[in-house]
Image (cartoon, grey):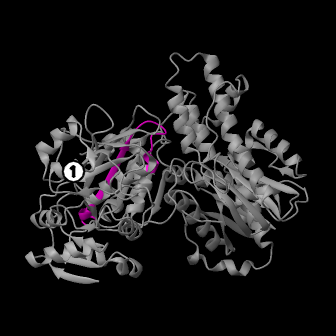
Amino acid sequence: MNILAIDTSCDETAVAVTRNTKACSNVVWSQASLHAKFGGVMPSLAQRQHEERIDYVLNKALGKKYQNLKNIDAIAVTIGPGLSIALGVGINKAKELAIKYKLPLIPINHVEAHLLSPFVNSDTNIQFPALGLVLSGGTTMLCLIKNIGNYEILAETGDDALGEALDKAARFLGLGYPGGAILEKLAKAGNPKKYKLPIPLINDINKNRFSYSGLKTAFVRFFNTIKKPTKQDISDLASTFQEVAFKHVENVLEYQINHSSLTFKHLLLGGGVANNIVLKSKLRKLLKNYNISLCVPNNKKLNGDNAGMIGVCAYLKYNSSNLEQFVNYDSIDRNPKFRI
Amino acid sequence: MKIIMENSKAISIAVDYLSWGKLIFMATETVYIAAVDATNPKAVLKLISFKNRPFGKPFSVGVTNIKMAEKYVLLNKQAKNLYERFLPGPITVVSNGKHTVAAGVEAENGTLGIRIPNYPFFLQVANKFNKPITTTSANANYQRRPYKLSDILDNISDKQKKLIDLMIDAGELPYNEPSTVIDTTIDEEPIILRQGDIKLKNKNEIFSRSEENTMNIAKELWQKYEDFKDKRAIVYALEGEMGVGKTIFVKGLAKAMGITDKVTSPSYDLLNSYGKLNHIDTWRMLNPNQELKEIVTKELINDKSIIAIEWADKARDEIRKHAEDAIIVWVKIKYGKRENERFISWGNL
């Protein structure tokens, strides 16, 4: 089944064509590239950017092969969670095309798509029930995947997301934005045990939530006690922050594995923080003790916001059956707080 | 539950009820209070259960004069000055307690807030009863301020109603702020825990010792402006370093507004909406003034929304433009000396 997928949930304007679980094209236009293209003109908010660039991204994703939606069987679009005005741009475009070409229009949850992103371009035989971990700038969530479309949230953040906390720590250290990747690079040169920062919610008896606001506060307060931080100090701080932030994920994950009546073969990891190599090796090490293998998208682009995962999510959920339920376009609307 | 009018006959009825360990509601110069005998443990438990709040959150108590106050607290020089300057009147002075009231009235650190309301009926009851009376406001935790009996009755459950034994109706009270709460045990200088009509300094600055305090201050700041709800848009512009508790403050606002959704940081999505409350963060915006303009739209202002903006200082110019069509409350949160301490100040723009 060929699906045209659109995602404009936040910064990225993303369009893809997917064939079953394969991303045939997967075009992402981020704020950063827009910035370069328009020669440093400061882009304004997501909505206008998405409007300016969606046709370009769409045409690029369709290419000659799928021009005029030739050979496309359905359209999938992210309806949430995300920024309402940004979501609206993708939804409007998707509706316009669905009406014009008389195609089913499938509404997709962005977080669910991250959760299932390890399926994209992969032939691993993932078995359910499985665990799912979405770690990004906007989401920090561990869930039980009973089956595709059937999830139970085991833990999620009550304040900041992990990716957000890493970005904030990075900017606080003067490393720029988005800082998660820069922080990771710098952390390599640092000693993760040099300083002591509190592991979030270490005293929780039932580890069924995440929190990063306390760590952020402790980090700022600690940093302010260092008189003149050297380059090495900054690396050590970056390394320590990352270590402690990840330790929190490991703790919650291990608790949930130990307290589940089920056994798992796979953990699916998605979201931008999944690009972090240190995190992946820590998770692999932990999961090995439980004979669980880590499934993570095979390239960086699939971890960040993209539409390939949206198309594949639509395929996995609905296959080619039941598509006639998706012809009532009016019922499809943005849902900024959409829960899985 | 019995309801009687406030008059001279009501004095001895109130005293009887208090001495029987009952929960009674009566007026002061600020708001209606939930009064019990502060030395009666059972009566205090009843009050805790009515207020629907955890054990260990202290209650202020009302007395008639400084001499009576000294039976329950140790007054230092700061405290004595405050008593002389402002009492009777709408302030609550926090001192170290002598542990002569029932458990659950003093704070966990042993301090106790004392009030001498400038309200003849209260003073007559307290004088005749001759024991300290709790003077906590008569609303349940995070509910509307009680200026008339219906403010209370309309916002509580049947279970809570059953706990009330007597209500003394003094009609609708003037809309005065709850008392200013001043702690004399923290520092050389008095520290303000809640800002009412009486001010010690030119600026509004409150001390917070915990996340819960910060949420509570947000609640107070919501209640101060709640009257403008549905009449004007209300903007809470939040300024303060990373990790200082801006999102915690918004959690308090949401709770006070009766929003039960989990409030999380909007840094990534830029805007999270919870009914009337719109929670915005400029931290990630490349051009905050411009981007805020696109989020805080005319409709949002015209809809009389409540808007909380984190890192508001980055978009000061854009926020100022709304000074005509919205109430703007500028809130600054600063780190204090010790780990959980914060100073929260605010002003109108």
On the picture, is A310 further left or further right than B33?
right
When the figure is inspected, residue B79 is found, relative to residue A78, above or below; the finding is above
On the picture, is B186 further left or further right than A181?
left
Q: Is residue A325 visible?
A: yes
Q: Is residue A214 magenta?
A: no
Q: Is residue A68 visible?
A: no
State the quadrant of the C terminus of chain B: top left
User: Which residues are the magenta region?
Assistant: B226-248
Residue B146 place in picture, x, y as percent: 25, 68
Circle 1 residue: B69
On the picture, is B102 further left or further right than A303?
left
Residue A196 place in picture, x, y as percent: 63, 30
Residue at the image point whose x is 39% and y is 82% from the top: B158
Circle 1 packing at 10 Å, graded few (<14), some (14-19), many (20+), is many
Residue at the image point whose x is 9% and y is 64% from the top: B120
When the figure is inspected, residue B172 is found, relative to residue A59, above or below; the finding is below
State the residue in front, B244 or B189: B189
Q: Chain of mark 1?
A: B
On the picture, is A197 further left or further right than A255?
left
View extreme (bottom): residue = B2
